[in-house]
Amino acid sequence: MNITRRYFLGATGTALGLALAVDSGTGLAGASAPGRLLHRIDCTQEFPPEQYFSSGTAAVVESSAGRYREAEAAPMARFGYHFPIEHVGRPHMAAIRFPDDKRRFMCIMDGTSYDLSTGVFTDWAQPLSGEMLELQLVFWPRWQDCSLVFMTWGEGEPAAVASIEIWELVDLPPLELNAAPDGRELGVQYEDPCGTAGAEGAFSHAEWIERVAAYMKYTGQDLLAYPLAWYHGPQFPSGREPSDGLDAIAAPNRVLYGRWTTHPVDWYATLLERFSQEQLSFQGSLTLMRLGSLMQRMNVDLESIRGGADTINNMLWNDQVQSSTNDWTTIYNGLNYGPIQSLIQQQGSIEPYRGGFKDFVYGEKRNPANPMGPIFNPLHPVVQEAIIGFAAEIAERYAKYPAFRGISFNMFASCMPWFGSLRFGYDDLSIKLFEEETGIAAPVDPKAPDRFSKRYAFFTHVCRPAWVAWRCSKIRALFGKIHASVCAARPDLRVTVTLWDETVVPGVLGAAGASHQILARPSNLELFREAGIDPDLYRDLPGLEIDLGMGNPRDRGGHGARPNAGANTPLEEACMYRDFDFLDAPMHTICRELPKPGAFIFNCWVEAWGKHLWARPAAGDPNLETFALRDGAPADGIFRLNSEYPPDGFWWDSQLRITAAFPAGDHFLEPFAHAVAELDACRITRGGLYLDKAHSEALQGFARAYRALPNVKFDTVGSLADPVAVRTVVHGGQRYVYAVNREYYPVQTELRLTGTPAQFRDLVYAETTATGNLLSFTLQAYELRAFVLEPQVEIAGFTAKVPENVEHDLTTAATEFFAAIAAARARGKMATGMDSMEQFVRTALAEGRWAFVRRALSSYIGRKCLALSLEAADEGAATPPAQG
């Protein structure tokens, strides 16, 4: 189904009232799947409290974009609508029209579950359209009494909605694709495995599997990366390691529960059977921070270690032993939940995230002297055997399923298959290996109690390049062994190493500041190398691949001291992730040169907890009999959970305020276009906490072109790939060509061919034709186009023409940037890196690299220089004139 904004505007006009139009018989004109309009809600109208609520003042606004209702520009201010549906479990769609006219950060949810959770942010780094935009949110209702809530997240970023339409859909038909037999992969990735019974209207893994598969096929996605192991180990019944499974449940009567098991059923087998039937692929992700077998063998007795005792734990730069990951993950082990339930029974409830539970399993204890980082030394033979054996067990268990593609490692700062940072890895065993293999020895007494810190000082100050390179080579050797163990079960399986920035940067460097910005600190390439992974070493083994993570939405709704600061967020907390995603040339160059680079786009979420409680279920709770079973087997336990807030008119007690938010309108596709243009990415996944179902049309359009391309590296045409990148390859007896627009404005593009093609074919738009040896077309915002022609006809070159007003505006803004730099210099002020950035921008202007110019001018350096120039102007205005 492809319900366009044009259809809705044409069908409904602008003055809509609430209409409970059940059985209206309205079909979706021209759509591939008919539906029935249930409700139309004009948000500028007033409704009684049983249909509408608001906290604070939600006023109707008249603007050039149209009329809409706007919440207060204060965190947690919200309004919402209550509406019935008839058929629980059938696919529905909410068409939400909202203004893209000023800075906003709007959380969208049903208020209790993840079923209707999405969000949108506007302005700042993405130019405004000044128009009404539309989100089309697919959902499967789990109850007949439904709701939609719109909440302001940050200061000065008000939520606003013009209208809502609720449609009941017949089905979600698979997208018709011209997919290459060995095509590029596009898919969904989850970081968190706990939400399956609180999302997609599902009460079980079985329901969740069916709905995720249906939506993936509907949007043209073919790969699911989902946790087989989370923070404490396997989520399946492992024969090697203690297993568990945790989940949150939203019951039919809107009561929320937490549930756990230490004996999970292998529901992944069901998933893999269904995915094999549907010709979808699955890759098991591992956020491998702990394995029970290693936790049981920890030696954190610092005195014994100083005396020479062996330890599998990491030794740090400060002469301490790492006894915990020192992050948020310690509580999420099923073995913790039995003692937690005992506390709940004794006290009635606990606040788990405010110190309500501290006695973590295996005696794991946070050390305030230590940073976030891996507990275990990745070079210790015991640790390596555990990791390699665990990977082999997974492959042996699931290789029989055609859908199974292998495993991927989420590289957080605390994950064990690397060092995390240069502060880790100064134990006796590792140093002995380094000295034996390199001949470089630290002049440190091998029995000194402070030998660990002295080793750190010597190796990082005297011979850092050799130390870093050696560590990277050892971690590459470890991943080579992991890959070999996986491929022993099936030779075509792969191991992917996913490099996360959103969790690594703050975990290693601390809270963002001026010191964290582009050109102030090293490239992410160097950050990852210091942690133990040099992507350049991953080009020689087919099936061992790198995915580059992109988490730039974290610049909006960040994790700073004031995550709800919104428009008042300090500049130093508002640019870093995006700048490194788009401007980190060393990282991009290395990844682009890999045989099969991939990209992971992280859907960062924001979360408000209120007074968060885990509590005893009510006596006689009718839900317990049903939900005490998990995948047909008894769970170890179940408890109530809820976040309490002051009453504001919302109709139910159980509340959840956690949502991912996305760039508005066409900007949703910006990271997809960037991954193709910058990396020639052969594989792209996107996700986080739950399935994004609000961008179907954008995903469908991208999938049609992207999945038509073969899963091989292409050659870049010409010397410039900005604002349009053109690449080509001869594969399977024909020449493939693609062109992708990095930018939000249309770009007129013309390809020059070495001859007139006789077999030219557009892989998406059949009406596209070549005239002689020229192929002309307009690339729309962030658009990817794909073509095939006979192999002997080559691409001689191309031109890309941006709109004149774009050139004018960017040139003017660049002139202002140069003037701001000059003003800063005159005052003796600087934004670190401004001299280099000035030269980069001047070069980009001369070459017509307009995408780089826009992102450089909106970077931290660009904004900081303008802020410094405004300070200079203010100082000048405040200085009294000299007396003659």
Image (cartoon, rainbow, N blue to C red):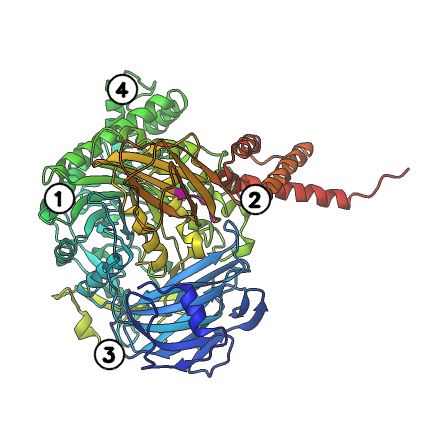
Task: Name the image quarter holding residue 536.
Answer: top left
Hey, what amino acid is under mark 2?
Glu
Q: Which is more toward the observer, 111 or 418?
A: 111
Residue behind mark 3 = 619
Residue 117 appears at what percent x and percent y?
36, 64
Residue behind mark 2 = 804
**Is most of the magenta stretch helix, strand or loop?**
loop
Q: Is residue 450 above or below residue 27?
A: above
Magenta residues? 740-744
Q: Is residue 217 visible?
A: yes
Q: Earlier in the sequence, mark 4 or mark 2?
A: 4
Q: Secondary structure at mark 2?
A: helix
Hey, what amino acid is under mark 4?
Glu
Residue 846 appears at what percent x and percent y?
55, 32
Task: Name the image quarter holding residue 246.
Answer: bottom left
User: Which mark is on residue 395?
Assistant: 1
Q: Which is more toward the observer, 751 or 687?
A: 751
Separation of residues labelled 4 and 2 (CA atoms): 61 Å
Q: Nearer the viewer, mark 3 or mark 1?
A: 1
Q: Earlier in the sequence, mark 4 or mark 1?
A: 1
> Which residue occupies 20% across, 33% down?
542
Q: Is residue 144 magenta?
A: no
> Which residue occupies 33% across, 44% down?
786
Separation of residues labelled 3 and 1 (CA atoms): 45 Å
Q: Earlier in the sequence, mark 2 or mark 3?
A: 3
Q: Nearer the viewer, mark 2 or mark 3?
A: 2
Residue behind mark 4 = 435
Q: Earlier in the sequence, mark 3 or mark 1?
A: 1
Separation of residues labelled 3 and 4 (CA atoms): 65 Å
Q: Secondary structure at mark 3?
A: loop
Which part of the image, by quadrant, shows the N terminus? Answer: bottom left
